[in-house]
């Protein structure tokens, strides 16, 4: 019987796609069954489920609050310029939302680092790594409480420095490689920069409220922050394609 060559396009991304290279013209059910089989969902291991926690937390919690933070920031500006008679609580709401975005981001980044270590089979979680995680989370949580400028600056640097060392470990950089080989276009490096910008805003909130130069600095940094949030959404989705 004559056969027809029908190579299916490689659709990539780790899902198992079928390889039906020859098929009789009189067997459409056979082809349909092969297609359905080929798109079966992969069975995830525990380490892969752990990898999903970071993107899931970002999508479910951080990005929705980012949307509200940006909207509230624009309302703060409209209120200050007398363009919009809005409630007096809006500036406070903007700062509260910003704190949650920052904290959610730090927590999700720590989760990503743990998940990658477990997935790559690297020295699971060593004492220095635990110390850096405590520094990252502790510094960020301290920012909710401390008031004095020096204490706020110290807490922000502790948190950001720990995040940076967790994501871009110096021995890796000295050995000639950034996180996951490339520095530019790398989701981890831009994530460190973005986390720093968020921690800076959280630490400097009283100054941003009180003085025009700080407010202008925050507005400029906020544009970069919004841009980096878009960059992270794109590069993070790209990385999801390569992880399985
Ligand atoms: C998604 C990122 C953010 C964007 C796009 C953003 C945007 C803005 C904008 C447009 C303003 C008004 C500036 C003006 O009046 O001209 C503002 C004010 C302010 N933002 Fe943000 N912001 C962001 C994140 C944060 C974070 C994380 C914090 C701190 C936790 C923060 C704290 C403040 C403070 C304290 C003010 C001044 C409020 C006042 O005038 O009482 N922002 N922000
Ligand atoms: C505020 C936004 C985000 C920041 C700051 C951020 C930051 C990071 C950092 C620092 C890492 C560790 C990279 C490394 O050690 O090489 C990471 C891993 C990862 N990120 Fe993000 N990310 C963000 C948003 C997203 C989004 C929206 C997605 C997907 C839709 C995503 C997907 C991933 C994936 C798949 C990994 C690999 C590890 C894992 O899955 O846990 N990220 N991210």
Image (cartoon, rainbow, N blue to C red):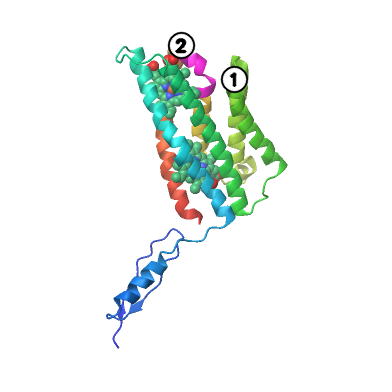
As drawn, the label of residue 211 is 2
Camera sees residue 211 = yes
Say which residue appears at 39% left-offset and 23% top-offset.
Answer: 72
Q: Which element is circle 2 on?
A: loop
* Residue 1 sits inside the magenta stretch: no
Say which residue appears at 61% left-offset and 33% top-offset.
Answer: 136
Q: Position of residue 55 (x, y in %)?
A: 48, 44
* Residue in the foreground of this view, choosing between 31 and 181: 31
Dot 1 alpha-carbon crowd within 10 angstroms: few under 14, some 14 to 19, many 20 or more = many
Say which residue appears at 58% left-offset and 31% top-offset.
Answer: 160
Query: Would residue 177 be found to the left or right of residue 98 on screen?
Result: right
Range of the magenta residues?
201-211
Camera sees residue 221 = no
* Residue 203 sits inside the magenta stretch: yes
Q: Is residue 227 above or below residue 29?
A: above
Q: Magenta region's main secondary structure?
A: helix
**Quadrant position of the N terminus in the picture:** bottom left
As drawn, the label of residue 138 is none
Q: Is residue 122 above or below residue 86?
A: below
Say which residue appears at 67% left-offset and 49% top-offset.
Answer: 124
Q: Position of residue 73 (x, y in %)?
A: 39, 22
* Residue in the foreground of this view, choosing between 119 and 197: 119
- Asked if labels 2 and 1 touch by Cβ distance under 8 angstroms, the answer is no
Q: Which element is circle 1 on?
A: helix
Measured in 3D between alpha carbons, the distance from the residue under mark 1 to the one under mark 2, in whole angstroms, is 17 Å
Q: Position of residue 44 (x, y in %)?
A: 53, 58
Question: Which residue in the rendered view is the most extreme toward the bottom?
Answer: 1
Query: Would residue 94 be found to the left or right of residue 169 on screen?
Result: left
Say how many tags the image has: 2
* Residue in the foreground of this view, choosing between 193 and 136: 136
As drawn, the label of residue 152 is 1
């Amino acid at each position: 019987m004559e056969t027809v060559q029908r190579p299916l396009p490689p659709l990539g991304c780790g899902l198992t796609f079928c390889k039906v290279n020859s098929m009789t013209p009189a067997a459409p059910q056979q082809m349909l069954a092969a297609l359905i089989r080929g798109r079966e969902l992969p069975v995830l291991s525990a380490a892969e489920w752990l990898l999903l926690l970071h993107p899931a937390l970002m999508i479910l919690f951080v990005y929705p609050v980012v949307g509200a933070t940006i909207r509230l920031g624009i309302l703060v500006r409209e209120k200050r310029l007398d363009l919009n008679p809005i409630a007096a609580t809006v500036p406070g709401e903007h700062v509260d939302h910003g704190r949650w975005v920052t904290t959610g981001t730090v927590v999700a980044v720590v989760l990503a680092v743990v998940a990658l270590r477990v997935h790559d089979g690297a020295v699971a979680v060593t004492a220095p790594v635990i110390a850096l995680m405590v520094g990252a989370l502790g510094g960020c949580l301290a920012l909710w409480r401390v008031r004095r400028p020096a204490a706020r600056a110290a807490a922000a640097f502790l948190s950001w420095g720990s995040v940076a060392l967790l994501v871009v470990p110096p021995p890796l950089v000295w050995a000639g490689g950034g996180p996951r080989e490339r520095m530019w276009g790398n989701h981890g490096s831009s994530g460190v920069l973005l986390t720093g910008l968020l921690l800076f805003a959280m630490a400097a909130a009283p100054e941003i409220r009180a003085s025009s130069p700080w407010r202008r600095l925050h507005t400029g940094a906020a544009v970069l922050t919004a841009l980096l949030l878009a960059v992270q959404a794109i590069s993070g989705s790209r990385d999801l394609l390569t992880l399985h």
